[in-house]
Image: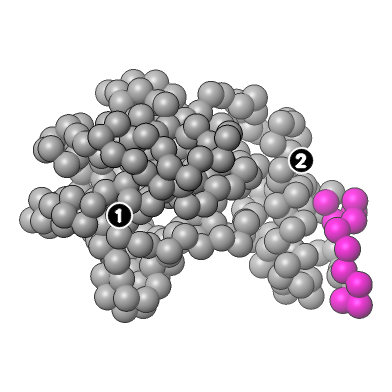
Amino acid sequence: MLNSNTSGQVISPELRQWIVEQLRVPFTPEQILQSMRSSGWQEAVAQAALASTLANLQAQTTLPGTVNQAGVPVPRASIDDAPLYLDAGDKQVAVLQVMTQPHLVVFGGLLSDDECATLIEAARPRMARSLTVINQTGGEEVHADRTSNGMFFRLGENDVVAKLEARIARLLNWPLANGEDLQVLHYQPGAEYKPHYDYFDPNEPGTPTILKRGGQRVATVIVYLGEPEKGGGTTFPNVNLVVAPKRGNAVFFSYDKPHPSTLSLHGGAPVIAGEKWIATKWLREGIFI
């Protein structure tokens, strides 16, 4: 580990090069941050060094063994003129927060309280332990990093699902057919989803099988259906951001390549008190089949 100078820590070219070398190993960004903390780097300096280095790599092919380094078109909200509200078709949705790196928008009031309650009650009888994708095979499995229960609604399965999917398609200017089935997740106290990426790792042998169903994932929308009393925020460790799980609101973020430089690492923080319900919509490059 490149030693820190605790009396005056700076983000030097040598530090940036060390981060690039760790990514080549490959270590994940969160592992690199932990190594920097252990070596005496201040949290703010470590976060800034990692974020800026990843941003510099975004349009490059520096890391070996990766593919699709050129960015692809991704869903995008019409926020260039800084609107306070966006037209979702059948309602106006507030723009509460915007980031450029990662490309992220927090929407206010995407669903009403009644719509949230309807989705929860429709999902409740069908809940089962959540699975994660097995990148090596393209299958799914129970994983210790994900301790929620979940289920899927088919495209347009009921009126609220159809309205939500139509609003997302309009807000993000992305074809409705390019969305995966809507997943509802339930987190009880202590349940969490450790930081992860939603895109499919192009270096894993199972990825070509997964991509046959509509190409890469290029964006995620997380809609908060039920508020916990404490905890349960959506975390973005590489940019030191936590989005509070406020009922009816949603966080959208996109990633134009399957690469850590998109800064799309995110997780579901443990629920401390109460219960959290969310709905997740993943968007693909092409039609999801």
At 32% from the left edge and 46% from the top edge, which residue is drawn?
Answer: 110
> Residue at the location (20% across, 43% down)?
152
Task: Give the CA distance from mark 1 to mark 2.
Answer: 35 Å
**Which of the pair 176/152 is nearer the observer?**
176
Select label 1 or label 2 by which is in front.
1
Percent position of residue 283, x then y: 39, 33
Q: Which residue is mark 1?
A: 248
Q: Nearer the viewer, residue 7 or 169?
A: 169
Residues rendered magenta in the picture: 6-16
Q: Please tell me which residue is depicted at 74% across the width and 39% down the height of the picture.
A: 57
Q: Is residue 57 visible?
A: yes
The answer to which image quadrant residue 225 occupies is bottom left
What residue do we see at 55% from left, 47% from top? 98
Which residue in the structure is indicated by mark 2?
Answer: 56
Please name the predominant secondary structure of the magenta segment in the image.
loop
Q: Judging from the image, what secondary structure is the residue with disc 1 in?
A: loop
> Looking at the picture, does residue 196 appear above or below residue 65?
below
Disc 2 marks which amino acid? Asn
How is colour applied across the structure in the image? one colour
Give yes or no for residue 153 being in the magenta stretch: no
Q: Quadrant of the C terminus?
A: top left
Image quarter where the N terminus lies is: bottom right
Q: Residues within 10 Å of mark 2 (few under 14, many from 20)?
A: few
Q: Nearer the viewer, residue 225 or 149?
A: 225
